[in-house]
Image: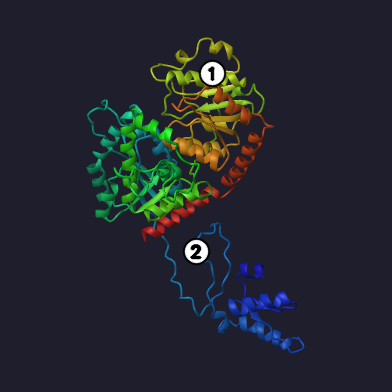
Amino acid sequence: MWESLMSDKHIVLVPHLGDQILNTRLLVEDLKVAVEVKREENKWFSKESLSEAIKSVMDKDGKIPKLYIYRVKATAQPYSKGKNHHFQSPETEKPKKKKKKMAKLHIAMYPWYAFGHMIPYVHLANELAARGHRISIFVSKKAQSKLQSHNLHPHLITFITITIPHVDGLPEGTETAHDVPMEMNHLVSDAMLLTRQQVEEILIADKPNFVFHDFAFWIPQVTKKLGIKSVCFLVVSATSMAAGIKPSPEATDDKPLTEEQLMRPPGYPSSTVVLNLDEMMSFVAASDFTCMTKLHERLTTSMSDCDVLAIRTCTELEGKFCDYIQAHYKKPLLLTGYVLPEEAESRLEQRWADWLQRFEPGSVLYCAFGSQYVLEKDQFQELVLGFELTGLPFFIALKPPVGCANVEEALPEGFEERVKGRGVVHGGWVQQTLFLSHPSVGCFVGHCGFGSMWESLLSDKQIVLVPHLGDQILNTRLLSTDLKVAVEVKREKNRWFSKESLNEAIKSVMDKDSEVAILLKKNHLELREKLIKPGFSSGYVDRFVQSLEELAN
């Protein structure tokens, strides 16, 4: 039956057994996609009745061939909650209009001035351009020089240079968030606000279908009056944005919010993917609290005012958090999947390849905390001493700690001599994805920034997490308590982690016979199999593009 439905042929049925007769009645009387050969009372069918049935469908001018012929479509789309999947008979279905060929879209993008935001925007632009759409990306001159190599479709992706105005308090020439310490990023955001007139003039001239943005919270105000749709495209996790939704009711002087309401607002979908009170209070006391609050408010304003929300994630990882966000904002929410480029034909730097090759498969620890975060010197020293305690070979790629010109001057006394031959602490950039794909590496110790999180999940390495900022902590809780694919290093109430707690976390996943290591490995590999399945990532982008095309028309 299924094979006939999947074909494009007329169907004539001669059932014999009970289930075959019922299947036949389904196709003939209910779906009206087939003809049944008539039988006599003794169940005999004649050559004449068979001939009559066949001729009824083969006569192209007859009534029966003019009926709609339904077929079950094979599709990669997952089942969508709340959608009804059913057939209609020819009598009840309205004639479908011939589907118009969709015009190619023109999409403008204005990402936040951090490379952790700009690069994912370019990755998505590459996916959209690969499907024939035109992209214009607003960037500073300094950023463009570093992003150009990521542009895989220069005939469709154009970088439009924006002049970044000077803001009091920022060093001359500041054009990206990486040019200044993190606590000054709110001033960079102020500079972004001052580019509004430049961007508006370009949008008036180009009139794209959509403008993608995140921290440029004023974009929806501009696009609404120009008849352009705004898309707030988030390259941070749905988990961290869901946790940032303000609880209701609001606190008052007479009735402050309880700890439970602060930690887990009404309807919030997890009891474990939360910040604890000590963590929240430490962020309030931090030197960059004012900066982070201002940036968060601007991002949530973008989410509130935009026409469409989009997040770089998938339902398999953050579905319940996406549902929570959509229920709060009550607007279309589109998912792009993880949108990472295919690994280029590149080789690991020879000196590191030679070093890694000396060790047994799965024995090396690799550690990196991203391009922006800088440790205090005492915590940096505690970290490297923790790696020394493991007794395992390790490679650490970190920026020099606060107040140090390089990593070498920050190392504990005698450290280099003690770990000589099995430990490297490197202060420069390394090819992280190539480290994570090297057979000698067995464990990734990271900070769980969103991009790094995806790279760890797509690898086959054990995962140990040392988060620093709020969104990293929530990402860590997602992986460690919800998905159970990673271990979080324990911290003291003052947010300090000890060399002993780091060593303990690493040992728990590197002992191949421990229950923890076995469980995490099993869960991680099962999730990874879904994520790397052929068509998984491209399917998300295809559905994302289809939704954009529908919204544009």
Q: Which residue is nearer to you in this view: 308 or 385?
A: 385
Q: Earlier in the sequence, mark 1 or mark 2?
A: 2
Q: Which residue lies furthest to the front in this view?
A: 254
**Dot 2 surroundings within 10 Å: few (below 14), some, or many (20 or more)?**
few
* Left or right of residue 522: residue 376: left
Which x, y percent locates residue 218? 27, 45
Which x, y percent locates residue 66? 54, 80
- Does residue 505 appear in the picture of this structure? yes
**Dot 1 surroundings within 10 Å: few (below 14), some, or many (20 or more)?**
many
Q: How many marks?
A: 2
The structure residue drawn at horizontal position 36% and vertical position 51%, both measured from the top left corner, is 106
* Left or right of residue 137: residue 62: right
What amino acid type is highlighted by mark number 2?
Lys
Q: Check disc 1 and report the residue beneath it.
A: 385
Q: Which mark is residue 83?
A: 2
Q: Which residue is nearer to you in this view: 156 or 299?
A: 299
The structure residue drawn at horizontal position 57% and vertical position 32%, both measured from the top left corner, is 436
Q: Which mark is residue 433?
A: none
The structure residue drawn at horizontal position 33% and vertical position 50%, both measured from the top left corner, is 304
| Image height of 421 relative to 144, above or below | above
What amino acid type is highlighted by mark number 1?
Leu
Quarter-of-image position of residue 362: top right
Q: Is mark 1 on a helix, strand or loop?
A: helix
